[in-house]
Amino acid sequence: MRQIFIISLFFFCKMLSAQELIGTPTSLIFVYNYPGNYFYLQLNGADKRKTDNENIFVIDNKVIQIKTLHKDKFIKNTNQDLAFQDFIKTYTNWEKNYLEETFSFNINSKIEFLKSSKGQDIAFWTYDMPLEKPKHSTDSTITTPTQTQLFVLTRIKDYMVGINSPLFEAETFDPIKSYLITNIDGIVESKNEIDVEALNKQMNK
């Protein structure tokens, strides 16, 4: 199932890659130097492994994906100044519509707006993704195997920034949710372009 997830996750959406990646003994740091928007995201984890898919990692046995997306990908009128919740809802509805049109399947999308421990506006978003063709059960109904995707989303200027992990077992829901909400506070913004070499030396003293 993990292999299926890694192959299929976000195949439907173009992503912007992390410009640089820094590893420390206890974390993985993604550095983004977009025009006029400079920040990095530090994820906690001692055991860190890359996968064959860009921006998908296995961190302490959790499959984690980082996503950044400029608003011009999902907002028609980019001159419109949307409040945080409207900005995030526009993004999630855009993804939801694509998924449901592609799979002809109700993804059971749910979103909850929260504050992180640092007071940052965030959204906890979940949906179910079909992994296999529907199966007919004995009572003639159709059963579609699903996998729940868990996200924590925020906004950095004109970019949606999110951390995602799949739910493989029901009992891991709360630990994964907690990890995502805790680590979204690993975002650090900079007024100037980030010097990756200097940041690496600072983090790996």
Image (cartoon, rainbow, N blue to C red):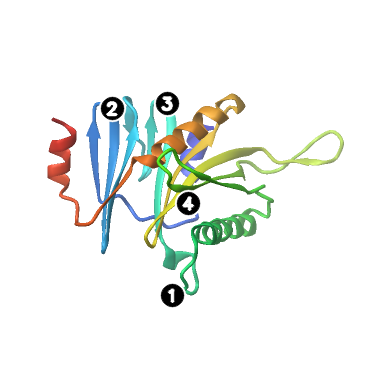
Residue type marked 3: Asn
Residue tagged 2:
26
Which disc is residue 79 wearing?
Answer: 1
The residue at the far front in this view is 119
Q: Position of residue 49 (x, y in %)?
A: 33, 31
Q: Earlier in the sequence, mark 4 or mark 2?
A: 4
Identify the residue at horizontal 52%, vertical 37% (top origin).
Answer: 166
Identify the residue at horizontal 70%, vertical 41% (top origin).
Answer: 144
Nearest-to-viewer mark from 4 and 3:
3
How far is disc 4 from disc 3 in space, using C-alphas? 22 Å
Residue tagged 3:
61
As drawn, 58 above or below 34: above
SS state under label 4: loop
Residue type marked 4: Phe
Residue tagged 4:
11
Contact, CB < 8 Å: mark 2 with mark 1?
Answer: no
Image label count: 4
How far is disc 4 from disc 2 in space, using C-alphas? 29 Å
For label 3, the crowd category at 10 Å Cα-Cα, with few meaning under 14, some 14 to 19 and many 20 or more, is few
Nearest-to-viewer mark from 4 and 2:
2
